[in-house]
Amino acid sequence: MTFDQLNLNNPLLKALADLEYIHPTPVQVQSLPAIMSGRDVVGIAQTGTGKTMAYLLPILRQLNFTDSKHPRVIVLVPTRELVLQVADELEKLTTYMTVRVGRIYGGGNINTQKQMVFQGLDILVATPGRLVDLAVNGSVKLKNVQKLVIDEVDEMLEQEFRKQLTTILDYLPAKRQNILFSATLTEEVSKLIQGFFNDPVKIEVAAHGTPLGKIVQLAYEMPNFGTKVNLLKHLLDTDETMSKVLVFVGKIKIADKLFEQVHTFYPKQVGILHSRKSQNQRIDGLKQFETNKYRILIATDVAARGLDISDVTHVVNFDTPTSPNDYLHRIGRTGRVGKDGIAITFMNEEEEEYLKAAEEVMHKQVAILPWPEPVEYSNVFSEAERPISKGKNYLKGLKRYEGGPSFHDKKDKNKKVNLGGSYKKTGGKKQSVNRNVLRNRSKRK
């Protein structure tokens, strides 16, 4: 099927042709008539299946011109990066239409956003927290909203946006169309649907946990942070197909530490993205990666949900995510919309159970590759990897290092054992002493 066979108007078809979009995805084919029917819609589809276009096309198809200042369509997404991405997609699709698109998000200048809203909008893309701020102080009027889209709703509820979502729903007119899209149908998502949706049409094109078919999943076993750095450098040095690599880490400190290391190997080829970077830094990092000026982007899970970065050749899980959902979202940044992709997971002994959990959800095993002989093992651990539990061999596979300055016996003075002092002699009970009794005893002497 082609987009020409769907019920789209000429301005949209012309914009799609400019973008070289020819064939709609299954979720787009099913969503268009459902949303255009006016009924509430719940779409469940795995990442990379074209969900954003699935709700934007029918909304734009039905959007008529008006000079009203107040937005008629609200699109809620969990992160500022997604606000920018959805708004950019809207602007591309409305090249031959007169549609006013606004974007508001936390971290941006609120006064500038107020002024933008005041000038008049048709569609507003927003994060929940900032929309609540502007609705409460009266800067955004929601009385004319006809359609509400909640995208990546499972991620919003995980980030505890439920209170903000409830507040927004209370501000909206009762007569409206609700459109919800999510990669997973969790218990919290189901509660939200039951509470606020009216007999929705359900669209499900891929069961929860179904990995995208064109993603090759691989893994390596190794002991620690330093060895992971060595392997990443080796892969980047020897594999020419790794031309656009998204490297995920779980913590901001590790992301910063890894960036410092990789930047020394590949200066001006690597960017970094996490929540402590300024908005301009985050936007610039994504732009440089999207336009292939950066070969490598190191990111926390802020980039795992919903972001559509074209032609990512490889996703590298520098650490194995603890949640199967996070694993699926991360690897879904490659192999998007029918293209091929490769996901490589670096796994230490503690992380084996996380990969097994993802395999159980996917009903698929990830291939463990043999260790590349040229890559040296390291004795450099991150703070999280340092031995905590007894009985675990955290140096499994550490073949080329036999101790060293990082591993030594305690000094004698540090071997002392606390025997409890007077506290222990009293059987663990604190003894209170009356100072007057002590003074009287002293006088008698």
Image (cartoon, grey):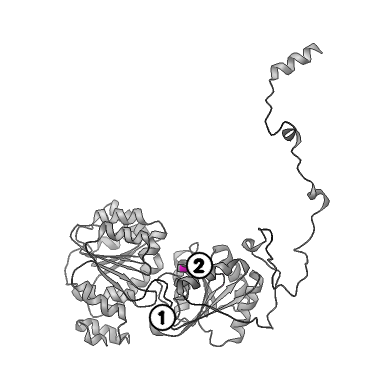
- Crowding around mark 1 (Cα neighbors within 10 Å: few <14, some 14 to 19, many 20+) is many
Instruction: Find the residue positioned furthest to the top.
Output: 444
The disc placed on residue 428 is none
Q: Nearer the viewer, residue 287 or 183?
A: 183
Q: Position of residue 377 (x, y in %)?
A: 70, 75
Is residue 204 among what the camera can see?
yes
Q: CA distance from mark 1 to mark 2?
A: 19 Å
Contact between labelled residues 2 and 1, with CB atoms less than 8 Å apart:
no
For the point 32% across and 55% down, the residue is 132
SS label for mark 2: loop
The disc placed on residue 300 is 2
Identify the image quadrant of residue 234: bottom right
The residue where tag 1 is placed is 336
Q: Position of residue 276 (x, y in %)?
A: 50, 61
Is residue 94 among what the camera can see?
no
Whichever of labels 1 and 2 marks the residue nearer the N terminus, that label is 2
Identify the image quadrant of residue 162: bottom left
Q: Nearer the viewer, residue 258 or 221?
A: 221
Q: Nearer the viewer, residue 95 or 418?
A: 418
Q: Position of residue 145 (x, y in %)?
A: 21, 62
In the rendered image, which quarter contains the C terminus? top right
Confirm whether the magenta stretch covers residue 322.
yes
Q: Tell me: 110 left or right of 222.
A: left
* Residues shaded magenta: 318-324
Q: Nearer the viewer, residue 272 or 62?
A: 62
Amino acid at dot 2: Thr
